[in-house]
Amino acid sequence: MSEELFKQMAQSILDGDEEISANLAKQALEAGIDPLEAITSGYMPGVNEVGDSFACGQAFLPELVMAGEAMKAAIAVLEPAMKAAGTQRQILGKVVLATVEGDIHEIGKSLVGTMLTSSGFEVYDLGVDVSTADILAKATEVEADIVGLSALLTTTMNNMQSTVQALQSAGLRDQVKVVIGGAPVTDEFARKIGADAYAPDASNAVRTVRQLIG
Ligand code: B1M
């Protein structure tokens, strides 16, 4: 049954249909399907297919926008269940999270934020297109344990390095660990720019942050 639902979820993203994607998310919750599983096995294949079609010129910006909106509508339904699943009451650490400057992709970053919140972290989500100066200011203000950076564009991933350097120059690098992620980012890139870790997806981000905080 979930296989059929997952196919319909992917199709709702391909069709850019917010109403159907949200309804399918409700059906998944009613059927007791894990919300993260619904995102990963249901909606993500759809969003990846739209991305691939866009890359080879078979889909255009409006389709990309509609797919993003349909994905957000589904996540809005699933999010409360993800947060409720977190039973942790004690704050495990403070995370300042942002999509780097020049980049407005928010869905993956927000998903990482939701998962971290539901796992017991205090998350300061600064949003998208956030400058290095703003990230540094917030990390200093809240005495962050972790700075989490997301980038979806090959052109903006380099802005992650300036944050690592700014933390270094401010003398905070020993206190604050940097975790990076997003489609074009790799483990090798994380090492190259001096970040502490790379996480390929939201659940790995939680695991990685837990390990870094010890
Ligand atoms: Co854009 N876009 N987009 N887009 N978009 C991509 C990224 C692209 C790969 C599509 C393609 O060509 N195949 C391509 C980038 C190519 C490249 O650089 N190599 C691209 C492009 C080119 C663009 C524009 C330049 C298009 C244009 O204007 N001509 C433009 C850029 C605007 C800008 O940022 N300045 C643009 C705009 C948009 C929309 C606004 C229309 C929309 C975003 C809507 C929104 O976020 N509100 C959009 C969308 C939807 C996509 C795709 C289709 C889907 C992204 C997404 O939301 N995925 C994307 C293609 C693709 O990814 N296959 C594409 C779902 C999300 C849950 O996954 O974000 O990967 P993701 O997050 C994952 C992991 O990566 C990881 O965990 C998440 C959950 O598992 N992760 C982290 C993410 N951040 C993390 C941080 C961590 C750890 C893990 O630690 C802190």
Image: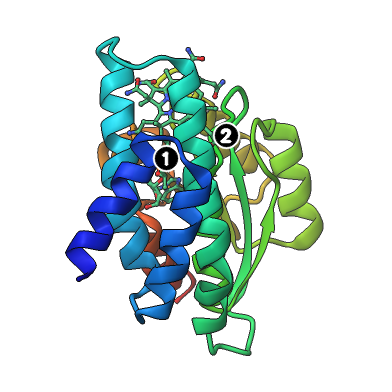
Task: Return the x and y of residue 147 as percentages of the image width and height.
Answer: 58, 52
Coloring scheme used: rainbow
Marks 1,2: beta carbons within 8 A: yes
Can residue 178 be seen?
no
Q: Secondary structure at mark 1?
A: loop
State whether label 1 is within 8 Å of ligand 1.
no
Residue at position x 71%, y 43% from top? 136
Task: Identify which residue, 127 or 61, lies in the foreground.
Answer: 61
Task: Return the x and y of residue 64 as percentages of the image width and height.
Answer: 45, 26
Quadrant where the N terminus is found in the figure? bottom left
Residue at position x 41%, y 60% from top? 24
Q: Which dot marks residue 165?
A: 2
Task: Return the x and y of residue 21 as percentages of the image width and height.
Answer: 44, 51
Task: Identify which residue, 103 or 3, lies in the foreground.
Answer: 3
Residue at position x 29%, y 36% from top? 48
Task: Return the x and y of residue 115 as percentages of the image width and height.
Answer: 49, 67
Callout 1, which amino acid?
A: Gly
Q: Secondary structure at mark 2?
A: helix
Callout 2, which amino acid?
A: Gln
Relative vertical location of residue 107 with respect to residue 29 in this rendering, above or below: above
Lateral position of residue 20 relative to residue 183, left or right: right
Displayed-image quarter of ligand 1: top left
Can residue 201 be seen?
yes
Residue 155, located in which quarter of the rendered image?
Answer: top left
Q: Which dot marks residue 194?
A: 1
Lateral position of residue 214 relative to residue 57, left or right: right
Lateral position of residue 188 relative to residue 111, left or right: left
Lateral position of residue 187 relative to residue 16, left or right: left
Task: Count residues near mark 2 (Cα–Cα under 10 Å), then give few for <14, some for 14-19, many for 20+.
Answer: some
Disc 1 or 2, which lies upstream in sequence? 2
Q: Which dot marks residue 210?
A: none
